[in-house]
Amino acid sequence: MDCLKTLVGLKGGCADIAADASLYLNSKVKYNELADYIDQNDYPNVDEMFTDIRSDAVDMFLAEYQTEMQGKYIARTVINQQRLGNYSGGLKSSPSVAKLKGIEFDRCTNYPMLGYRVTRVGFIGNYTGNVVILYYDGLTGVLLASDTIAAIAGQEVTLNVNRLFNVEDLVIAYDATSIEGYQTKIDCYLNGCRSCTPFRVNSHVTSRPITTPVGSPDQTYSQEMGGLIVDVSMECDNQSWLCGIKQQLAMPLLFKIAELVMEYAVSSSGRGNTRTMRDYDKLKERHGLYKSEYEKHLRLALDRAIVPNDPICFKCRKTDGIYVAIP
């Protein structure tokens, strides 16, 4: 989770590793200490050791934080996958044109925790060669990602992907210049209008085939998708919520990193290929201190967290209790 991995930095190397929260490990563990702890058989340099341990710390923190937060909410995942791109009526030409062809998805709600999960993309056409599938933010025109399909003329070729996009509008398209596709359509597409209630892709998103000039966000609604095939669903993107409150999570992350550094130092304290032979008991003591501080600051972060007002992705957890009536 990149937004958390850059919260805590490190000073002292050839170049500082930046910290989004202005917190540096040096306040707990000095750079020269890390240089003493490192085993060259494990890491080539201090910076790589730090970034690797920091990544592990974020993963462990996320697992613990979300487990603890289950006492405050029930996080729900909305999975209602559907395939868009039907050609059951026959293989009809979608001629090459110097435009992007594809599909636009429009989220029906304003709840920001819902993201698009794209699990498979495909193409069918009278073309053999690479077809580059492009994913855009439909509102800003920013390119989010790309995948390449090795197309074979007359055959449906699919590519399994696992992409989550937290945007309001998502455009998936390819550059149809010199590429002849076959017409693929949305089953519920009616009379040039976007699919809509009760013909939504699912209960959270509508869709429509589009064409657009290459390099331009201006979209024209089309009757077909140019051979593109997409499997998509909507699901709860709870990590985006955590990114929104990341400053509250910086201090526990700092102590988790320090804890894992001490854990590494303890495990390698008896090796002969580190710079110093260290005091095992003192390292164990520091490890316990940082672990205790981590747990304390994790609890503070949990207490401060405000659960989003999002009835789709978050559901209040009712607390069971026994009540005694006094006459």
Image (cartoon, grey):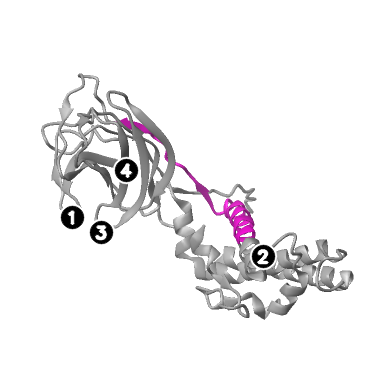
Q: Is residue 149 above or below residue 57?
A: above
- Depth check, front residue: 251 or 213: 213
> Is residue 202 visible in this depiction of the protein?
no
Which element type, helix, strand or loop, lies under badge 1?
Answer: loop
Distance from disc 3 to disc 2, alpha carbons, whole Å, reads 37 Å
Query: Disc 4 vs disc 3: Cβ atoms closer than 8 Å?
Result: no
Bounds of the magenta segment: 55-84
Q: Amino acid at mark 1?
A: Ser
Residue underneath mark 4 = 132
Q: Earlier in the sequence, mark 1 or mark 3?
A: 3
Residue underneath mark 1 = 216
Name the mark nearer the viewer: 4 or 2. Answer: 4
Q: Earlier in the sequence, mark 1 or mark 2?
A: 2
Which element type, helix, strand or loop, lies under badge 2?
Answer: helix
Mark carried by residue 140: 3
- Depth check, front residue: 231 or 15: 15
Distance from disc 1 to disc 3, alpha carbons, whole Å, reads 10 Å
Q: Check residue 288 for magenta coloring.
A: no
Left or right side of 36 for 144: left
Residue underneath mark 2 = 49
Query: Disc 4 vs disc 2: Cβ atoms closer than 8 Å?
Result: no
Kindly indicate the quadrant of the structure image that contains residue 199.
top left
